[in-house]
Image (spheres, rainbow, N blue to C red):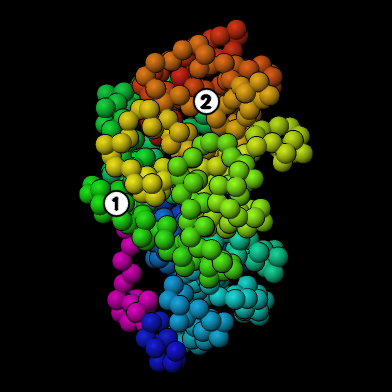
């Protein structure tokens, strides 16, 4: 690749340096405001996340801030993914643009990019903001850039952000254990209940990606997710970083995660199913997780050793990704099928399951320990509360939550307070 071609790309990426302007949407992802707080700090800022979730948009929106003399380059083209190209671009930005803020998109493709940035960071007063679709590469950079880098993870759109893109801007985050706050919010939006219920199903079907929020053609939605997200990650992004001998196996393990989202799994069973050795299957799961296509949760215990030994749950990163991968259309999203994917939408780092197979789908461990059981169904029976009540008893908790399809009420059972919340409502504030 010639330097002339690189310079042409530089000017295409930076129209504001030629009298033009950067075009960005007015809507801001919630992470934008967290990153914005660090923009005037010296540290390198790294944004990691799934493809097509808005990393580049956030970077360009940050470039628009007054006083930010910025330049931007993306390494998405294979021809640009060389260390010498990175050095050339940074030098060009400094010597020709005089840029103090340098934004580098998809930098994880460049070998030893962290070493290059470290040298400029230590020797020149340059602020770097970088992004990548691969968590491992950015996390490894923390060692080389120790004390010099802050990493932010951009998740798929939340339901709250999805609604914001549709013009619903009166939404706010509320802690799940703030029953009073959730009840007040419910009463303020109850007149629009049917709207929220309908949009929640749409969110499950397509809501991971900003560009699909206002798209309704099923063929466009499924092709977008399958071709521009899943296949690019599995057949291009992951092999560009890791040695993948069997891309077909990588894809099949991903499809397994989608079909079995929110289920327990064992690596040994996957080895038998796909006739692959333990190390290969374990590595491929790690690669899919590093690329943000799947999540894996541990069974909660106060003992770290027990967490490691117990069976884990596997999840698709978002229900819409699973639906596209396994070919589900809107007409297939009936109550019987949706339960596991609603649970996937609420997935956290932990679930809970004891030896008697009592189970809680989501365990939050923040300021307080808080259990959430997902029963996305119209009828709720006393047996649906069994696992939740057992967990609350074992860990001496006063509050717990049951996610339902429609029901909203608060019950006091044996001195324990359990809030029944429609899935759409909790997603609005989660």
Label 2: state its secondary structure. strand
Residue 86 vs residue 394, the one in the foreground: 394
Percent x, y of residue 119: 66, 79
Query: Which residues, given as a range, are shown in magenta?
Result: 11-27
Residue 333 vs residue 200, the one in the foreground: 333
Eyeballing the image, is 40 above or below 171? below
Q: Is residue 376 visible?
A: yes
| Residue 311 is one of the magenta-drawn residues | no
Direction from residue 347 to residue 211 in the image, left or right: left
Percent x, y of residue 395: 69, 22
Percent x, y of residue 324: 36, 49
Eyeballing the image, is 53 above or below 409? below
* Residue at image location 49% in from the left, 66% down from the top: 237
* Residue at image location 42% in from the left, 30% down from the top: 339
Eyeballing the image, is 156 above or below 127? above
Q: Which quarter of the rendered picture does the N terminus lie within?
A: bottom left
* Residue at image location 31% in from the left, 72% down from the top: 21
Label 1: state its secondary structure. helix
Which class describes the residues within 10 Å of circle 2: few (<14), some (14-19), or many (20+)? many
List the residue tagged with mark 1.
221
List the residue tagged with mark 2.
373
Q: Earlier in the sequence, mark 1 or mark 2?
A: 1
Residue 289 vs residue 214, the one in the foreground: 289
- Separation of residues labelled 1 and 2 (CA atoms): 30 Å
| Residue 26 is one of the magenta-drawn residues | yes
Q: Are marks 1 and 2 in contact (CB under 8 Å)?
A: no
The numbered mark at residue 18 is: none
């Amino acid at each position: 690749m010639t330097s002339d071609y690189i310079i042409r790309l530089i000017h295409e990426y930076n129209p504001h340096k030629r009298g033009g302007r950067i075009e960005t949407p007015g809507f801001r992802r919630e992470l934008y405001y967290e990153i914005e707080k660090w923009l005037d700090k010296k540290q390198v800022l790294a944004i990691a996340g799934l493809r097509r979730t808005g990393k580049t948009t956030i970077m360009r929106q940050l470039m628009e801030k007054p006083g930010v003399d910025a330049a931007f380059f993306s390494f998405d083209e294979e021809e640009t993914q060389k260390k010498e190209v990175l050095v050339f671009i940074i030098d060009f930005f400094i010597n020709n643009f005089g840029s103090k803020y340098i934004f580098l998109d998809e930098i994880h493709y460049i070998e030893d990019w962290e070493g290059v940035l470290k040298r400029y960071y230590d020797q020149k007063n340059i602020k770097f903001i970088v992004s990548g679709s691969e968590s491992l590469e950015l996390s490894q950079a923390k060692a080389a850039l120790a004390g010099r880098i802050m990493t932010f993870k951009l998740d798929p759109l939340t339901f709250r952000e999805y609604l914001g893109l549709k013009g619903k801007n009166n939404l706010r985050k509320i802690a799940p254990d703030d029953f009073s706050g959730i009840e007040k919010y419910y009463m303020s939006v109850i007149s629009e209940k049917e709207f929220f219920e309908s949009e929640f199903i749409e969110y499950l079907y397509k809501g991971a990606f900003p560009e699909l929020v206002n798209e309704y053609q099923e063929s466009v939605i499924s092709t977008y997710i399958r071709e521009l997200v899943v296949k690019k990650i599995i057949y291009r992004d992951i092999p560009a970083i890791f040695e993948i001998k069997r891309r077909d196996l990588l894809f099949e393990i991903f499809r397994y995660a989608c079909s079995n989202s929110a289920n327990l799994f064992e690596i040994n069973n996957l080895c038998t199913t796909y006739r692959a050795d333990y190390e290969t299957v374990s590595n491929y799961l790690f690669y899919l997780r590093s690329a943000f296509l799947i999540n894996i949760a541990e069974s909660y215990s106060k003992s770290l050793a027990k967490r490691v030994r117990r069976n884990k749950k596997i999840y698709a990163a978002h229900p819409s990704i699973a639906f596209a991968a396994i070919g589900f259309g809107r007409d297939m999203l009936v109550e019987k099928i949706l339960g596991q994917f609603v649970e996937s939408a609420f997935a956290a780092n932990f679930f809970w399951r004891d030896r008697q197979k009592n189970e809680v789908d989501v365990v939050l461990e923040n300021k307080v320990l808080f259990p959430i059981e997902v029963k996305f169904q119209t009828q709720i029976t006393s047996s649906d509360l069994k696992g939740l009540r057992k967990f609350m008893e074992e860990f001496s908790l006063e509050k717990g939550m049951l996610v339902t399809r429609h029901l909203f009420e608060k019950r006091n059972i044996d001195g324990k307070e359990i809030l029944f919340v429609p899935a759409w409502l909790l997603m609005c504030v989660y």
